[in-house]
Image (cartoon, rainbow, N blue to C red):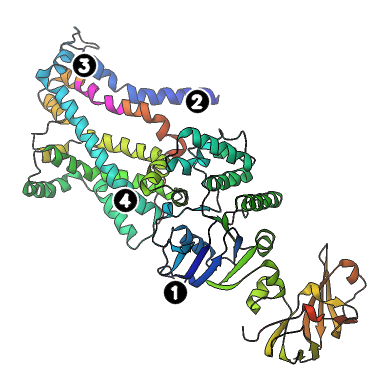
Amino acid sequence: MTRLVLEGLTKAYPGAGQAALHDLSLAVESGSLTALLGPSGSGKTTTMKLIAGLLSPDRGEVLLDNRPITSLPPEKRQVAMVFQNPLLFPHLTVAQNVGFGLKMQGLPAHRIADEVATMLGRVRLTGLGARRPAQLSGGQQQRAALARALVLAPRVLLLDEPLSNLDPTLRDEMRGLVRDLQRETGITTLVVTHDQAEAVALADQIALLLDGRLAQHAGPDDFYRRPASQAVARFFGAVNFIPGTARAGQFQTSFGLLALPPESAEGAHLLTIRPESILLGPGPNPLTARVKAVTFLGTQSRVDLSVAGHPLRAVVAPDAARSLRAGDSIPIALPPTALWLLPAQS
Amino acid sequence: MRGSWRTLAGLGLASWLILPMVPLVIWSFAHGWRFPDLLPQTWSIKAWTYALSPASGVLNSFGLTTLIAAATTLLAALIGVPAGRALGLHQFRGKTLVTLFLLAPAVLPGMAVVFGLHGLFLRLGLTGSVPGVVLAHLIPVLPYMTLIMAAVFSRFDPDFEAQARTLGATPFQTFRCVTLPAILPGLLTGALFAFLVSWSQYLLTLAIGGGRVQTLPLLMFGFVSAGRNDVTSAIALLYILPGLLILAVTIRQVTGRNIALTEGLRP
């Protein structure tokens, strides 16, 4: 069980004007499965490589259980990394690939064979050890790559987009396997992904990187209900932003007063509400909205609304939107518990 | 239809390669062979017994030529692998210029290089010595080695090395267990060329060796000038032996997908 701490990590690539990673501080709790989330170019892979020791930071420290490892070479860190491509060594068999790290440690052959056999069983590749990597399917290769890292019982496991090369059904299966193995072994794990849905489904904690900076580090639920900024909210699919001023539990907007949840902040803010939290019909914080467009999306329908010229988007069950036509005037409600205040300037 | 064309092409190629050697074989067993006789009047193994006897110096020379070619190949690999890696994997300022410089010895006439080199080696005390000849051989050999290795590395994914390191492999282990197996076919191709280019070097050996380093081509030319067609033929047949041998051993490695010669450098 190892706690991974990043302190003020900064890294700029030569020639690139902006730093790839700017003053990143992050504590990954022992035994947790944390997703490092962000769009491409946000510094996720740079962070991984800094932790693995494949890059060295311009400033900052990487600590495992309070001991700095920043100056250690990759092979001395006990941090195993699984890349986006399985990168199985093509000249070795699957079993030799999985046993690679143990062989480098100089373990006797019979012990390697035992450990490899156990590990292949855990990733459901029993009986495929004698094959060449090219004879495995994409999903099997990815599982072999995972086994090759896990067999070392590393202090920290880094997974760089481990699911992005897989088709959707395999992705679900692999996600479940990663979750189960992580829970069983309790290895502190950091998963890089650009897909917020994947991060939410997989991780206990999410660290969102935007433009090389840590935007928010919290549980998955908080990114929907309590985003730290407009940028974070947008990344998680929020589209409704209403400017105004909060005072004494009420929010003054251009179209009237809205009741806020208890203990809300005061002053100028941006109010946000998830599209799926807007009620079509009477309720708390009632408003009258004009329907601009209804889009059927299969399992749900998107309803674009306008409240006194201000756009709002609702997502509802298809049945609730079936009778709506563009141009209709309908009552809607914004439940106070679903309202969240964001900093005004962002 | 296709099969017969292939047979025909095969036969054509074989005769192209093998027919020129037939007179050599005949000469090496001939005891005088005069125009317009189709075949020699009398046969003899005298040329062979002489060529293989210590008196002719052929066996000594064979050993020396092998040593020089092997040393040249080894040095070329030690320099060519890292240099090819830099050219194949990295983009840097002046890469085209570096490539041009590397190619220059293979493009320039050897005679032009020899004079300047001789003066330099004379001052360094390298003339007339085996190390001097090996260094001189590196000039035509290194471009081949480096460009072949650059082509090999341009297809190598260095993430494999990063992966090995995070699995606990030291830099040396990473090279031995990951990089080397990946580049081995290309390295063998390069080594094959290096060995044969050094093996067949005449001009540089003559100029730098100053006649004191008697490799097989030098020895053979001596017999050519002496008009000993029978001994020359016997030596010539010995001379092509390593080429055939190396080719037979490595043919599977250097043909097919792995051949890297035609793959250019990425600009």
On the image, the x and y values in percent for residue A307 come to: 82, 85
Query: How packed is label 2: few (under 14 Cα within 10 Å), some, or many (20 or more)?
Result: few
Whether residue B241 is situated above or below residue A324 in the rendered picture? above
- Residue B152 circle label: none
- Residue B5 circle label: 2
Q: Are marks 4 and 1 on the same chain?
A: no
According to the picture, the residue beneath numbered tag 4 turns out to be B83
Instruction: Pick whichever, B66 or B30, lies toward us.
Output: B66
On the image, the x and y values in percent for residue A337 come to: 79, 79
At mark 2, the secondary structure is helix
Report how far apart the C-alphas of labels 4 and 1 lie in the structure: 30 Å
Report how far apart the C-alphas of labels 3 and 1 lie in the structure: 73 Å
Q: Amino acid at mark 3?
A: Trp
B214 left or right of A79 in image: left
A165 left or right of A335 in image: left
Discs 4, 2 touching: Cβ within 8 Å: no
Main SS, magenta region, reads helix
Q: Amino acid at mark 1?
A: Gly
Q: Amino acid at mark 2?
A: Trp
According to the picture, the residue beneath numbered tag 3 turns out to be B27
Circle 3 or circle 1, nearest the eye: 1
Q: Which residues are the magenta region?
A: B235-244
